[in-house]
Amino acid sequence: MDLSEIIEKIKASLPVILVVDEKNNIISKGSGFIFQESDLVVTCAHVVSGVNNASISLQFSDDEENFVSAKVVVTDHEHDIALLKFQPNRERLPLKLWSGLTSEGMPVIFSGYPFSLMNLTTHQGIISSIIKDPTGMTRYLIDGTVNPGNSGGPLMSTSGEVIGVVNAMRRESGDILSKVQGMSTGAISLHGLDLVELYNALVSNLQLGVGYAVPSSYIPKCQGYESSEENPIKKQAGKKK
Amino acid sequence: MNLKYIHLTNGNYLGFISNNSLFSRDGIYLGWIDGNTVWDKNGQYRGQISEINDVFYILKHKFSVNPIPRVPRAQPVAPTAPVPISNRTPIIVPLPLMDGYDNTST
């Protein structure tokens, strides 16, 4: 499957999101995408949570020289979604909403900025399962390489339309190992090697190939965006006339 | 004060619920209750309050996907812990249920 045209089309609408403290330390990094309005970015709430004394910066892959500041306008912790407002320095089109049926087995792509990468990366997979958690919330299980930093990126159809928001990767640790994870650094050591730190490094680099996404229907509607069925790109085009 | 007493499936008395907050037997804050759902002090899902033979437990589905963690809430003022009530006979919960407090970690 050649995705080059799709990636070219969506690239300018997918910023990396950096949460930076007063000393310019990056305290959180994630992905996002322009949606509904051309000055509105969707990301995960956990990417931008607890930023009271920190600032949020966006960087677009077609404008690597500049960081654009953004502020949180909506936070929905329950669905792990946040909306950010920013001042666009050039025209950027919102991604389209997928209007088809989302079903298990359908091929999907997702784009974002995993690990410490500042380059937009795109992965492909399928929706391996549509599940409901114990609170009744629907989530998509993705068979694909979701990694730290992908949070907030769009889960899309192979035509680049938004199906959901990537928000987590699956990790498994048995009862014994999860107890190690809860230990403080240095609690177990062997020949001077901190095994708790070693364990945490191993777990954070585990790739089980299973990720989660929140359906796009949970994205809060922002003022001016009238319907989830509406085509944001058409709407923008209409505004210009 | 309207209290609900919670036991672990191994029979041990875990603690009590007061004003939608869960406390250990010693009155240490463990989490909060939203509807019937229990979230621990770190915002992690712990299960649902379930009644079996007139005893309350916090049970969760062993194989289900955990909900998205919630933002931890401010710790409430701990009430005076009631006199710990007696342990119960251990129960074996049917699959796929398991104790949300896993008999040990709080």
Image (cartoon, coloured by chain):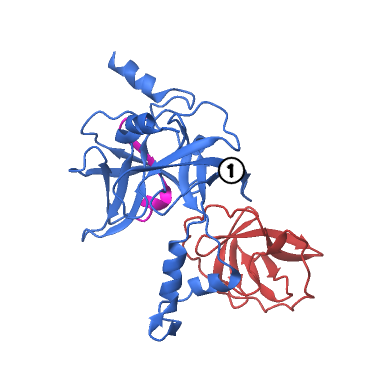
Chain colours: A blue, B red
What residue type is disc 1 on? Answer: Ser
Q: Is residue A11 left or right of residue B44?
A: left
**Outermost right residue:** B53
Q: What are the residue bounds of the magenta stretch?
A: A37-50
Q: In this orientation, which residue lies closer to the viewer: A2 or A168? A: A2
Give how far across and how far down residue A76 sits, in percent: 46, 45
**Quarter of the image containing the N terminus of chain B?**
bottom right
* Residue A93, x across and y down, in percent: 32, 28
Q: Is residue A139 left or right of residue A58?
A: right
Q: Which residue is mark 1?
A: A128
* Residue at the bottom extreme of this rendering: A191
Residue B71 visible (yes or no): yes
Residue A38 part of the magenta-drawn span: yes
Q: Quadrant of the C terminus of chain B?
A: bottom right
Residue that sits furthest to the front in the current view: A1
Identity of the residue drawn at 42% across and 48% down: A151
Give the secondary structure at mark 1.
strand
- Decide which of A58, B72 is in the foreground and name it: A58
Does residue A19 lie above or below B90 as drawn? above
Going by the image, does B88 lie left or right of A71?
Answer: right
How busy is the neighbourhood of tag 1: few (under 14 within 10 Å), some, or many (20 plus)?
some
The reply to whether the magenta stretch includes residue A95 is: no
Q: Is residue A219 above or below residue A31?
A: above
Left or right, residue B6 beside residue A67: right
Residue B98's spot in the image, x, y percent?
70, 64
